[in-house]
Amino acid sequence: MSKIVKKFISISLLLVISVGISACQKDARPSSNTNADKENTGQESSASASSTSSDSAVQEKDSEKQSKSDLPLVFIEGGFYGLKDATGNILAEAKFDFISEQIDSDRVLAVKEQKWGYLDMNGKEVISLSYERAFPFADGLAQVMIDGKYGFINTQNEVIIPAEYPQALNLRSGFAKAEIGDKQWVLFDSHGTKLSSYENIFYFTEGRAKFQKDGKYGFLDENGKEVIPAIYEKADAFTDSLSSVKKDGKYGAIDKSGKELLPFEYSSLQIDAADQIWFIKDNEWGMMKADGTVVIPGDYAFFESFEGDVKIAPFSKDGDAYGFIDKNGKQLTDFIYEHGTTRVSEGAAAVLKDGLWGIIDGEGKEILPPSMDYEEIFSFSQGLALVSKDDKVGYIDKQGKVVIPLIYDYPGETFEENGIAAVRLNGKSGCIDTKGNLIVPAIYDNIPSFHGRAVSVTSNELNGCVDMTGKELIPVIYEKPFYFFDGIAEMEKDGRKLLFSEMGHILYQEK
């Protein structure tokens, strides 16, 4: 888990980021390669939990096609997993070591005693729990492991691609890839037919999949054919039928046919939506639409992107004085705030003026005039903002009231979606809830991550996992930190990989 750092940086650093250095700050504006970087995650190792993560991110978006009220719900009882319907009726008793919440093709991944298989939507075992390792279904295909090799099955448990590959990945839209050599992957269709081989193939989004050939990038269509040749140095996944691509050292934008929509004249180009395209040109930030209409002129040294329902964002012309602007380019405040002003989050932002902190709302109006004497204030999360002073941190609400006293060691963490935050006390790490209760004792060297019910912990360079009451789920004896994806974490001990559920059950052990 990355430490909270300053959120606003100079244009010189932003330009470095735009050509490939990844920004790690929670609140920092992403570079133009954000989408491409997300695609790369987990592409090379289907045996690892990271590939589940990437698949889960895409799968989560597609699962919205089906009403959530139609989907069974995972529940945990006595440390085991079961299924119930939306009204609470039990579909499958809590007897499994793991059940995935990623549901596709009317099949639910389940594990018991290190054997993997699938349940149907009524909780019935329809594909026997017999595989060494398996992944959630995606568009009618599921990746499975037999004797340490990967292949794919359909919803009837028929073999579509034989389990004879060291690495493989479901690309969605009825396609899959499998490793056939060093930096060589073969593309399969939904019938198991081999189509083409490439240095790499990425997920399908909006009917297009990026591929790599001779070090350059192009795109495949929904039939697996090369519709855009591999002529680009970099390429992002399509967003609103647009892709940011790089050629001859400059960025431009193309449509799904490969037609150039925005010229190759930008040092950075990030497409958040068709009407929200961020660019850097001649060392200055701006925002435009897909037709090239400039909404916010490129004469700013810094700009924070609009995310989600956020309507306003901080901006600066010189990197020192900041104001706020809306999506239409209307300036809402003068350049009266200083370096350190945060982005808008949960309808509020912390602003710095004359060395004092205040709070504005999502319209740029001051809720609390600058009057608070803190060294730093960070973005709001779960209704609270992390504040620091004299090497101590605590939390305030949107009215500036101290909710959690500044008693914890600097630096600190913002609250996660599950309502807990990692803190350090006397040099040791623990966790608090939004009321300031220490729910995981501060006895660990580090807390790398959270996921659902699980908290990863590190002590003496060994790793384990506790629940949100501090109860040990997985002993602190493993060599790698726990990072959960779709409820599964990959660990290593004595050179062997193991997979765990959030409840501490061993799901897979490498032979």
Image (spheres, rainbow, N blue to C red):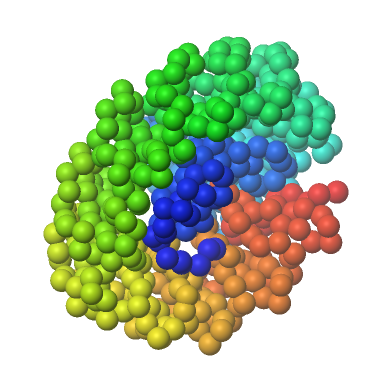
Rendered view: 7 above or below 108: below
Rendered view: 95 above or below 204: below
Residue 79 appears in view: yes
Q: Quadrant of the N terminus?
A: bottom right
Q: Nearer the viewer, residue 176 or 181?
A: 181
Residue 178 relative to residue 230: left or right: right
Q: Residue at x 48, y 55 (%)?
A: 13
Q: Quadrant of residue 69?
A: top left
Rendered view: 160 above or below 489: above
Q: Position of residue 235 (x, y in %)?
A: 54, 30
Q: Residue at x 50, y 32 (%)?
A: 250
Residue 87 appears in view: no
Residue 358 relative to residue 455: left or right: left
Residue 426 relative to residue 271: left or right: right
Q: Position of residue 85 (x, y in %)?
A: 42, 41
Q: How many marks?
A: 0
Q: Quadrant of residue 397?
A: bottom left
Q: Residue reaching furthest front?
A: 282
Q: Position of residue 258 (x, y in %)?
A: 49, 16
Q: Residue at x 15, y 71 (%)?
A: 369
Rendered view: 153 above or below 424: above
Q: Quadrant of residue 483?
A: bottom right
Q: Position of residue 320 (x, y in %)?
A: 32, 62
Q: Nearer the viewer, residue 490 or 338?
A: 338
Q: Residue at x 23, y 74 (%)?
A: 354
